[in-house]
Image (cartoon, rainbow, N blue to C red):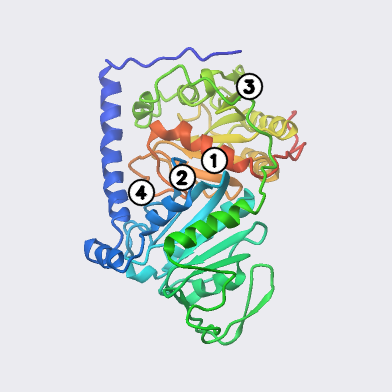
Amino acid sequence: MTVLDTALDPRDPAYLEGRSTTLERLADLESALEEARAGGGEKYVTRHHARGKLLPRERIEMLLDQDSPFLELCPVAARGSQYPVGASVVTGIGVVEGVECVVVANDPTVEEGAVNPYTAEKIRRATTIASVNRLPMVHLVESAGDNGTSGGLFPPDRVPSICVVFGATTGDASYLPALSDYTIRVRGHAKVLTIHPQPINGPAGVEVRATPVVPAGPDGPADQLAEDERDGLRLARQCVRRLNWRKQGPPPRTTRPLPPRHEAEDLLTLAAADPAVFDPREVFARVLDDSDFDEFKPGHAAGIPAGWGELHGYPLGVLAVPNRSCSAVEAQKVVHFLHLANATATPVLFLRHIGTPADEEHDTRHDAPMAHAISRSTVPHLLLTVGDVVAERTDEARFRFSWPSAGASRADDGVIDPRDTRTVLGLCLSAAHSAAVEGAGHVGVFRS
């Protein structure tokens, strides 16, 4: 066992300054989160409650197992745009009847739950996460239709989907009940109106015939009819229980992993560290179990630290990639590391940071074999962006989060408090293990 021997001095002025900078950024993030949680404002929230209806986060809380965590995705989507913060929908991963599920809940207090381009992108990302990680999907639907969206909002085609209709639903959202495996409607409130009489294609190319108005009474057809919203959520939990869903990936090596030996509070300082003195190993020491880190090729390509450890009991490869072109030696190290991760079916965390300038001018052609290896790798990839880095889109990553920085107004799946990094990554790894964890074996030539 190799334990990282690292410590930061909380009395160091640089430590205090970095901590203060990150806390200021977190305060700004919290104000955006509060705006998203407020929905459409006090007037519309009060009116919604007066109708005997629940808010989206109240519906989610009642759906999930008691005291279980909920990993919200893209909570401040649309911030800085013409659309409301949060994009009138709440998405995330939570536990229902012991099963990790992706949950999507429209917020009818925000423009009556209308779907705008940010809403559509947010829902599509949640659908992708459900599909690639083999997570059942629960839609809590109440939407007034489309507002400039590009459409194409369908349930995932490789996992079960459950749809609970709480109120008036039009536009693309109106097709979810017909396309979902299980449909529940709330008596007296659920009304579905489709506005396109022509056929549309489902996610697997299956033709679905849309009709101007859903027939079969004011509530419309449903697998089950709920007496009220709470009953609808109870029935949704019942549907998940009857899925008999089981994880296909291996369980953690231990159910009681040791916490890191170094304080998570130190990550506040590291989040604002000068790139010239930032050491990714300091991050590894504060997220890995027992701060146990076996470094891979420590004498080669020191600018790209990599190695092995465990996080909440799950084996994990960690790889720090600077936001610059790599040398030939660095590229070989990354390819070799990914080859071993795939050979042992070990998920990989990519830590993207600014990094120090290269000692020599690197040829961008050396990035090609590394990009090829990443694209061929089939083990789960997690991406954590730290510092003022505008990370490139990496569609191979199962989850993508970032720390708050001057340039991080939003990330693909969310900006997180650095102190929550270990918890967030643990939830992501657990979700990824709902699917089989399989490596591609040989992912490229790594020997010179």
> Can you tell which of label 3 and label 1 is closer to the viewer?
1
Marks 1 and 4, the one that precedes in the sequence: 4
The circle on residue 428 is 1
Q: How dense is the environment of label 3, judged by Cα within 10 Å: few (below 14), some, or many (20 and up)?
A: some
Q: Cα distance, mark 1 to mark 2?
A: 9 Å
Mark 1: which amino acid? Cys
Compared with residue 315, is residue 41 higher up or lower down, i.e. above or below? Answer: below
Mark 3: which amino acid? Phe
Residue 41 screen position, x and y as percent: 25, 61
- Residue with the mark numbered 4: 409
The circle on residue 296 is 3
Compared with residue 143, is residue 258 higher up or lower down, i.e. above or below? Answer: above
Looking at the image, the residue that sits furthest to the right is 442
* In-front residue for pair 21/436: 436
In the image, 436: left or right of 423? right
Marks 3 and 1, the one that precedes in the sequence: 3
Marks 2 and 4, the one that precedes in the sequence: 2
- Residue with the mark numbered 2: 71
> Can you tell which of label 2 and label 4 is closer to the viewer?
2
* In-front residue for pair 63/276: 63
